[in-house]
């Protein structure tokens, strides 16, 4: 009863439609509660409908409410099944904490039971209760549960046991496509590529990006950026630039990634491309220079809304909430498809209000870290301009063996055996677009020999 009373209070606070009555001293508010608000059967129907239509952000939110406010075992199991469906469908954030309070004992040893016990074991291990964790893991049929192998690989990766992690992830990628859902397969491949990068096995890492991750639709901007770093360390600078240009034109993500500016600056430094580096710095200044100047003068950070779109290592939680809000807004536009569309629309409104308030609480830290990243990026580009001057007189470059004058940093590749860009014709310049609508770079090493 207490939980249902709390549920009614929250909806009364967040979902009401106000009707204001003027008086000399006060304002009165009226609100109408949605019907069936305390009916767990209704909520189960809603979460099933959301999952069926692949509204996974709403599915997770509704399931979380069910687990919080209702006690019936069948209702909770239905919520956990919906959560599992959302995870398998590609919900992008961890939901381990939702399994903390789970007290189910699935009778049938099916894939749901295996997944449920896996998450229960993971959350208990994170809580330091190894005995309970092992008890849950013993209930799992590992031959049917790729999640447990992925978790073991992640643990090995975290303690820098790269060989064990590579073994586990490689076995997972070699399994039948029906054994492992596509979102998990993507996570396995991406993690394996990052491990190879940390081991400085850049060719192997790049192969995973080129043969799989960069062919995904929709694309992930960070995949192009991480692939570009592999090319940079392989000293394939023109290809690195090509990948960065493709990142620019193929990404619709509103998140600002300053790392791409630094990587381009490092490339221009390596080949002494002073003009290009100056142009890059001017471009950055044209976009952000006015804001940087005003921030340095003490202008309130709230005056620069674009700072909310800058992702930094210190803004993970703000980024997560922002993306969930974006997902809920996108889904809310199609709620008319649902059987209980009116209630769903009110529920989405409630959830978005709650998350908006949470984001506002984190906003000051986000703005501060974003402003710092913005100013540091500008300073780094300025410093690189001095570095390129030093690079032009670096003895290691000046006295390097010259090979046929200026070296074009790209190879014509007729059979495409090493998956390099296959240039049909050469065109000097910063970048150009091929007949396949891919952006390619062709730039000369300008360091004196």
Image (spheres, rainbow, N blue to C red):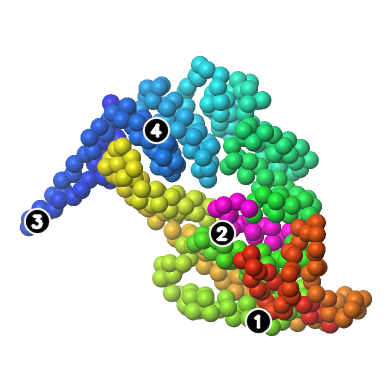
Mark 3 lies on a secondary structure that is strand
Residue in the image at 60% along x and 20% along y: 139
Q: Position of residue 163 (x, y in %)?
A: 79, 40
Camera-side mark, 2 or 4? 4
Labels 1 and 4 touching (C-beta < 8 A): no
Q: Main secondary structure of the magenta part?
A: helix
Residues under numbered marks 1 and 2 in contact, where contact means CB atoms less than 8 Å apart:
no
Mark in front: 1 vs 2? 1
Q: Do the residues bearing badges 2 and 4 touch, measured as CB atoms within 8 Å?
A: no
Q: Which mark is residue 48?
A: 4
Q: Is residue 59 left or right of residue 239?
A: left
The vertical placement of 133 against 18, above or below, is above
Give the quarter of the image for residue 372: bottom right
Residue 312 badge: 2
Q: Can you say whether 233 is above or below 140 in the image?
A: below
Whether residue 135 is visible to the viewer of this picture, yes or no, is no
- Circle on res. 391: none
Within 10 angstroms of label 3, few (less than 14), some, or many (20 or more) residues?
few
Marks 3 and 2 close (CB-CB < 8 Å): no
Q: Earlier in the sequence, mark 1 or mark 3?
A: 3
Q: Which residues are magenta?
A: 215-230
How many numbered marks are there?
A: 4
Residue 151 lies, in percent from the top left, at: 64, 35
Q: CA distance from mark 3 to mark 4?
A: 43 Å
């Amino acid at each position: 009863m207490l939980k249902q009373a709390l549920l009614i209070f929250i909806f009364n606070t967040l979902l009401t439609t106000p009707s204001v009555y003027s008086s000399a001293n006060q304002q009165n508010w009226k609100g109408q509660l949605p019907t069936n608000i305390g009916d767990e059967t209704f909520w189960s129907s809603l979460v099933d409908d959301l999952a069926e239509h692949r509204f996974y952000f709403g599915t997770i939110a509704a399931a979380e409410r069910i687990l919080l406010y209702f006690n019936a075992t069948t209702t909770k199991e239905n919520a956990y099944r919906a959560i599992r469906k959302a995870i398998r469908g590609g919900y992008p954030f961890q939901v381990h904490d939702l399994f903390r309070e789970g007290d189910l004992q699935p009778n049938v040893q099916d894939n749901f039971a295996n997944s449920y016990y896996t998450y229960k074991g993971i959350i208990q291990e994170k809580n330091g209760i190894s005995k309970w964790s092992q008890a849950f893991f013993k209930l799992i049929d590992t031959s049917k549960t790729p999640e447990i192998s992925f978790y073991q690989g992640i643990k090995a990766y975290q303690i820098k046991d790269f060989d064990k992690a590579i073994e586990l992830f490689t076995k997972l990628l070699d399994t039948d496509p029906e054994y492992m859902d596509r979102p998990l397969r993507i996570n396995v491949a991406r993690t394996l590529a990052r491990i190879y990068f940390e081991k400085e096995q850049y060719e192997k890492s790049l192969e995973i990006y080129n043969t799989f991750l960069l062919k995904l639709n929709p694309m992930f901007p960070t995949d192009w950026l991480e692939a570009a770093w592999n090319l940079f360390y392989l000293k394939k600078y023109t290809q690195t630039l090509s990948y960065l240009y493709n990142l620019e034109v193929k990404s619709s993500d509103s998140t600002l990634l300053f790392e791409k500016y630094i990587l381009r600056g490092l490339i221009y430094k390596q080949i002494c491309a002073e003009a290009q580096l100056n142009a890059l710095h001017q471009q950055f200044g044209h976009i952000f220079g006015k804001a940087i100047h005003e921030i340095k003068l003490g202008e309130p950070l709230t005056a620069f809304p674009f700072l909310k779109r800058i992702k930094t290592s210190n803004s993970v939680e703000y980024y997560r909430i922002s993306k969930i809000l974006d997902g809920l807004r996108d889904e809310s536009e199609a709620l008319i498809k649902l059987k209980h569309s009116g209630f769903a629309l009110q529920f989405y409104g409630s959830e978005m209000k709650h998350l908006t308030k949470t984001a506002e609480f984190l906003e000051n830290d986000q703005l501060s870290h974003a402003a710092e990243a913005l100013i540091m990026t500008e300073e780094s580009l300025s410093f690189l301009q001095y570095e390129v001057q030093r690079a032009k007189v670096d003895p290691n470059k000046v006295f390097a063996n010259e090979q046929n004058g200026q070296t074009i940093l790209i190879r014509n590749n007729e059979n495409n055996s090493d998956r390099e860009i296959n240039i049909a014709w050469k065109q000097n310049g910063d970048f150009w677009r091929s007949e396949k609508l891919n952006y390619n770079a062709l730039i000369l090493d300008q360091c004196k020999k």
